[in-house]
Image (cartoon, helix red, strand yellow):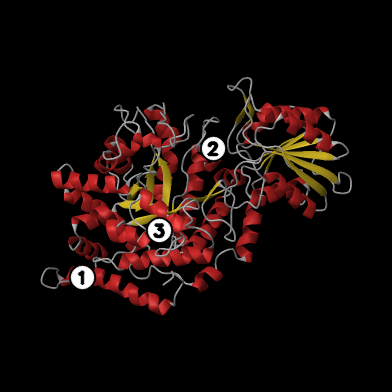
Amino acid sequence: MHDRIISRRALLTATAVAAAAVTAVPSATVPASAASSPRDRLRRLISRMSLEEKVGQLFVMRVYGHSATEPDQADIDANLAEIGVRTAAELIATYHVGGIIYFAWAHNTRDPHQIAALSNGIQRAGLAQDTPVPLLISTDQEHGIVARVGKPATLLPGAMALGASRSPADVREAARIAGAELAAMGINQNYAPDADVNVNPANPVIGVRSFGADPVAVAGLVAAQVGGYQSAGIATAAKHFPGHGDTKDDSHYALPTIHHTTEQWTELDAPPFKAAIEAGITSIMTAHIVVPALDPSEDPATLSYPIVTGVLRERLGYDGVVITDALTMEGVRQKYGDDRVPVLALKAGVDQLLDPPDLRVAWNAVLAAVRSGEISERRVEQSVLRVLALKERLGLFRDPYVTRRDVDRTVGTRAHLAAADRIADRTTTLLVNKDGLLPLNHRRERNLLVVGADPASPSGTTGPPTGVLATALTELGFSATALSTGTAPTAAGIDAAVAAARGKDAVVVATYNVSATSSQLTLVGALLASGVPVVTVAIRNPYDIARLPGVRASLAAYSWTDVELRAAARVIAGRVRPRGRLPVPVQRADDPAQVLYPIGHGLTY
């Protein structure tokens, strides 16, 4: 039987099984006064669990396939190779996992109706266990450059773009829309907001995923996003504690070290996490980073008792769910083996173990640690209680299911799409506008060429940025053609761009993280030498302008998703005035100690 979206009445029948498991009260052992306490009911549920079921609740795991029971053969093969099970339903039955994370590359997120059906199939599998428990279903839907669910869902500006808008109301509305759409598809936990303060322009992993470099401003926007998501009934996860904003290394591939002193950490990194806690954040994600000032052992924060328990729980007073960043990442695997990492994370004070590379190894390692006494069963039960309490708070024990009607009336609606465009219009930042080149006039500068970078497309794009920009400008009255020259244009590509620019009234160049050795510099220089007016649009980090002093006009779009590129096109065309302000400083390329454009810089017309 396919995982189709079945009627709400039939789904509620299965839900009643889980509800009964939680609400049944043995009168001989529980006083009547405690009968209505959710925590007591959850403790009784835990008391009926086997050790294997308790340990399973601590894991959140990837699984391949669009269906919980009938994935494609290639996904069955991938599941067998990586997890030792065929399907999501088998994963739940075998390991009793407490949550599943969706990825586009795992074929979990083809379209909204499929996602909803997969979510329902996963919940049915959870309720079919000996001890019926619904699952947390999560994903990374930060928006901007990180989005696992694509169109026709609404795609919104990412964090740094929202930081440029400087509007808590916009941040809250964007999160409410995103949360409502996730909830309609049965995704009940989003790994957002990014609470890192991006003070290092060379940061390869955070960058535009951060709201900015001002810890006070970031704290306010983090709190607003938490409120927006949770108003839509979605659990949130502030990340990456204790702060991943000042690093030149990517924890997916290395173990970064943050060299902040305790005082610097308190001033720069802590405020957004404090704000998230005050806003009622439901979970916090740890970082695979070393912070010697907080833990001189140089263990990754994910495995650090002084950081997770000492700082997060005791110093900041947080008692909610703590989840690791993905345990497949090299940052957490360099110092210890895959069998020790989950055990050490739990000993540090973590509750959920996200996506271990080998679930069998990790699950059995935790079981062995409990049976040997290294970890007490009481300690495991503390984390299970936090996880179950979060599920209870989300209403999953009452009704974990979604319907086709939920999807159709919520996901990608006209109102949501229009709101996304309105919010994006307040994010585009005009950095340079010499001699009033912008806005372009479609009667005066009618013929445009759009060239530049074509990075791998995140969800929310319909093609290369050059094509999206050219289409948007054409729809605004210009005659715009696109020529993709890539993030590392070749000499032949540069020559082709210069040739294509002849006879054009202006050239729009999409730039992507321009470095001192990037051939994008050669491309822009050659176009400037041709005499055609050049407008650059930074489609990721806004620092590119520091290396492009000769351009007459420059914008920061903060992402190459359609919603942000369309907004940049409207600014270029003068359909909306630029309103964004830099949420990070742009330093001089030849002297990083000097600020070229400060936080808050942004021109208008």
Q: Earlier in the sequence, mark 3 or mark 1?
A: 1
2 or 3: tag closer to the N-terminus = 3
Residue at x-position 21% and y-position 53%: 381
Residue tagged 1: 35
Expressed as whole percent of the image width and height from the top left, the position of residue 451 reads: 74, 39
- The residue carrying mark 2 is 207
* Residue extending farthest left: 28
Q: Are marks 2 and 1 in contact (CB under 8 Å)?
A: no
For residue 101, the mark is none
Residue 84 percent location from the top left of the image: 33, 52
Q: Amino acid at mark 3?
A: Ile
Q: CA distance from mark 2 to mark 3?
A: 27 Å
Tell me which corner region of the image, top left, top right, bottom left or bottom right, holds residue 586: top right
SS at mark 1 in the image: loop
Amino acid type, callout 2: Gly
Q: Earlier in the sequence, mark 2 or mark 1?
A: 1
* Quadrant location of the C terminus in the rendered image: top right
Eye-nearest disc, 3 or 1? 3
Residue at x 35%, y 52% (from the top left corner): 60
Quadrant where the image shows the N terminus: bottom left
In the displayed structure image, the side of residue 217 where residue 98 appears, left or right: left
Q: Nearer the viewer, mark 2 or mark 3?
A: 3
For the residue pair 572 and 139, the one nearer the viewer reads as 139
- The number of numbered discs placed on residues in the rendered structure image is 3
Name the kind of residue labelled 1 in the image: Ala
In the rendered image, which quarter is residue 583 located in?
top right
Side of 312 relative to 270 (left or right) = left
- Judge whether 273 appears above or below 141 on screen: above
Res 137 label: 3
Q: Are marks 2 and 3 in contact (CB under 8 Å)?
A: no
